[in-house]
Image (cartoon, grey):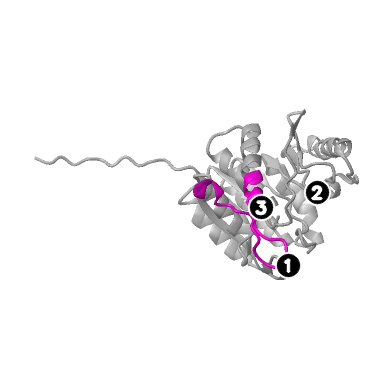
Amino acid sequence: MNKDKTIEKKKIPCALTIAGSDCSGGAGIQADIKTMLSLGVYASSIITSLTAQNTLGVRDIFNLTRHFLNEQFDAVFTDIYPDAVKIGMVSNKEIVEGIVENLKKYKAKKIVVDPVMVSTSGSVLLQEDAISILVNELIPLATVITPNIPEASKLSGLEIKNRKDMIKAAYLIDENYSKKSNGRPAILIKGGHSIEDANDLLLYNGELTWFENERIHNDNTHGTGCTLSSAIASYLSLGYDLKEAIKHAKEYITNALKCDFDLGAGSGPLNHAWKITA
């Protein structure tokens, strides 16, 4: 006689990306999903904006409504609750306010905020009236923020030219949040824009950690910031602590850059699938 057997469900780590869509596939939501999939994580997405862009730059941006943003949050968090969240492009005040409200409502955890202000090609992606909300309301909810050097300069008010400036900037940013009661994120300043090296600096619980990496001489860097932050979120969802998550994320992006894809007429995309095609 056959007995009913209960099928044991396998727990799959889940990560959520909240960002803009890149129709060319190299950055934004598309890069995040590719990264998460490659790292063995189930990816869900909440789209904040639609962009018309390619390897040459951003042509146009269409922002979704606050109502539709809320509907996406409800759909994701009431069904497949994420183990970690990555937040990328948030272009206007209304969207940032909506994200803050919903992250609090659903008690989201392990939040990686990539404070995207300007694209690699130089296009402004964050409106001025949204910056104060990003800085004062969204960033305090983060586990870690991942500004590049231009973004860290804007957040700290300090022009960054070298490693010493990166350290000063990290402490200045941290000081701003040490005075706030609603959150104090770890700060990872990405050194990819530095002329010296590609080393990143983490300030976490008052401790500085350098992540030393070789500079990859590759002009095809479209979506590197999106990829790193989504990789960190992926490793956090897999249960790694923050330093280990950053270390592994750096290794992932370094190898994705080494593939040196040559797609498009401008700054081409990375090989997000290198781990599963090697």
Q: CA distance from mark 2 to mark 1?
A: 18 Å
Q: Say whether disc 3 or disc 2 marks the residue closer to the N-terminus.
A: 2
Disc 2 designates what residue? 193
Helix, strand or loop under label 2:
loop
Q: Nearer the viewer, mark 1 or mark 3?
A: 1
Mark 1 residue crowding within 10 angstroms, few (<14) / some (14–19) / many (20+): some
Q: Quadrant of residue 146?
A: top right
Q: Quickly name the residue at label 3.
A: 226
| Residue type indicated by callout 3 | Cys
Dot 2 crowding, Cα within 10 Å, few <14, some 14–19, many 20+: some
* Percent coordinates x, y for residue 220 in the rendering: 70, 57
Q: Is residue 142 above or below residue 261?
A: above
Which residue type does callout 1 highlight? Leu
Predominant secondary structure, magenta span: loop
Percent of width and height locating residue 89:
69, 57
Q: Is residue 157 left or right of residue 65?
A: right
Between the C-alphas of marks 1 and 3, the distance is 17 Å
